[in-house]
Image (tube, helix red, strand yellow):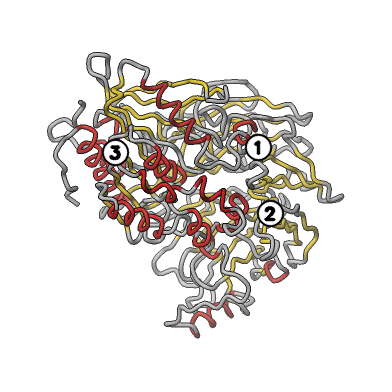
Amino acid sequence: MTRPRHGAAPFHDLLAGHSRLTALALAPDGARLIAEVRSVDDEGTRHVPRLWEVDPSGARDSRPVAGSLPGDHAPAFAADGTLLFLGEREGADSADGKGEGQGTALWALPEGGTAERIAGHPEGIWAFTAAARDAGTVAYTAELLPGATDAGTHAARLRERAGIDAILYEETAAHIWRTAPGPGEPHTFVLRRGGAPVNAGGQGLAGSGDVVLSPDGSLVACVRAANDLAPDTNVVVVADAATGAGRRTFSRPGHQYYRMAFTADGTALVCERQREETHDTEWRVTLVAFDLASGEETDLLPDFDNWPWPGRAVVSPVPGDDTLWFTGDERGHCPVFRRDADGTITRLTASGAYSSLCVTPDGTTLYALRSAIDSPPRVVRLDTVTPDQHPVFLDAPGGLGPLPGTLTEVRTRADDGFSLRAWLVLPDGASPEHPAPLLVVPHGGPQASWSAWTWTWNPWPFAARGYAVLLPDPALSTGYGQRMQERGRGQYGGRPYRDVIALTDAALARDDLDAARTALAGWSYGGYLANRAATRTGRFKAIVSAAGMWNLEAFQNETEMHAYFRKIFGDPRTHRDRYETDSPHHDAAGLSTPMLLVHGGRDQGAPLGQALSLHSDLQRLGVPVKFLYFPGEGHTIGRPNHVRVLYETVLNFLDHHVLGRPWRRPAL
């Protein structure tokens, strides 16, 4: 069993306190590359962003951006090369001197100059975008209270509501947790140099922060909800940036659009289109293009069966060039793909998971963040044409030293003959003479994949403690073609659970793993599969269920995503069979394995009542249970010190029940 060296910090402490690369931005001329790096503050209570300069050529070391301060984040560039970002700075007054710009504001920082606040809003700005060729136009998203039309009237209403937190919903409270807390609604504002912000949201362009400008700054596009009767549908609105007057709208019943990008000539809008899963239809995602003149919608990936869940498309900056690049899951990786004008798809990277793509102005080079199961995000450079290339790594913060183990794969066949795979992390020292205990960790989602580095539920703290970790991709995982969705449709606790068990059996056929010492831990949908396993099998010595679902009937009435889950499971009064088949609480009598429950008090995705109900059943049945509760956390555990507590508690729980060691209450 691998143990930390005497005096050395446990690996999970190093992980919780490590700096994280989270975003990239490339200057219009391709000469400057800016990375957002989040580091833990001195108290260990939060991650503080900072902007770093990365040399695109790789010749010079990275360094903090001159003139940037801790807290600056969301970097982007104006057309003239001015660095734009969001941040809060002490002593920054609003333009009118009335304090109406307090909170997160939009700043401009010329190279070698001083940051200037160019836009603010009461309670802050959420997100922004800049025009590619018009240096004077930006669009940003901020809240307005009902009846307010601009920052001034919004601030006045905030003052009137001082000490009041009541909110009256006259239509529906659905999706209230997906926006900023409070009664305000997101609106899009367009700001031109020397002018006042135009409330494009006044013409119905309220949105979620997904807003883009055309390259010349003349058009702004945003998404908004269709109506309360169609929660699975949204509308893309394209409006005049100067007046907010609507030009075009695009929608399709049962579909939602995200992550927009105008083409370089401004004639089309490229979006991700998503059809959510129902009991009878599979989840499906593709990239589409809207022709702004004709209104025609074109599927850009009609025959691409990787089912990659493509990320935001990066369009060629060269007018007239219809090439675009995107990322998407593929069999345990998340490569970069190039789509040519004729529809040809080329995979540009051989391994790893890529994000935050940036393309140079001549369209010949890409910069990105690359991570993998065994590597945190790093800044890399790629060319835009070579298939299956290996990237050039650039100097930037965020690197991590040697990991306490090795990474390999496990493959097997499911009960329907489908080919399954999983990542397997092996701790140092695992061998036939010293087989390692195994921890099985199904992912959340369920539409997701173990393809990238994660900061919570990371396998390496467990490997550092001597555990092998299996990361299975069962039915409903992304990156395995549409068939992977079809085979899991309508059976949350059926085939995906059986796939996890099949991969577990395949892993335990290895002679360097100990089949008598196994455990399972999952978060979100993985927590649901953990609860499913707890009622179906006694093979595991311990089970950890984090933010999981237990009583599906109660869950789909309480969750912020109730409309989505109602489509999958139907009305419990008319589709009792679906709930009886898939809701673990119906099989509570099968509980016998010691369980650790982990939940956040502000979790609106999987509400706290799910954990409380499971905890009650476990106590009623006399099953050993512990409950790790984070009152201030949501669906994920994010505060660095909380992450430390999470890992230490889970590791000690596993050591006790899997390895037979005395229980140790975490010091914190």
Disc 1 marks which amino acid? Pro
Q: Earlier in the sequence, mark 1 or mark 3?
A: 1
Q: Quadrant of the N terminus?
A: top left
Q: Is residue 185 left or right of residue 583?
A: right
Give coordinates of residue 87: x percent, y percent: 46, 59
Q: Is residue 341 left or right of residue 574?
A: right
For image coordinates 66% across by 25% down, the residue present is 346
Circle 1: element type: loop
Q: Which mark is residue 542?
A: 3
Q: CA distance from mark 3 to mark 2?
A: 52 Å
Whether residue 480 is situated above or below residue 233 in the rendered picture: above
| Quadrant of the rendered image containing residue 417 | top right
In this image, 113 relative to 401: left or right?
A: right
Q: Residue at 23% x, 18% y: name it.
A: 434
Q: Is residue 311 left or right of residue 85?
A: right
Q: CA distance from mark 1 to mark 3?
A: 54 Å
Q: Can you tell which mark lies on residue 361?
A: 1
Work out whether 641 lies above or below 150: above
Q: Which residue is mark 2?
A: 213
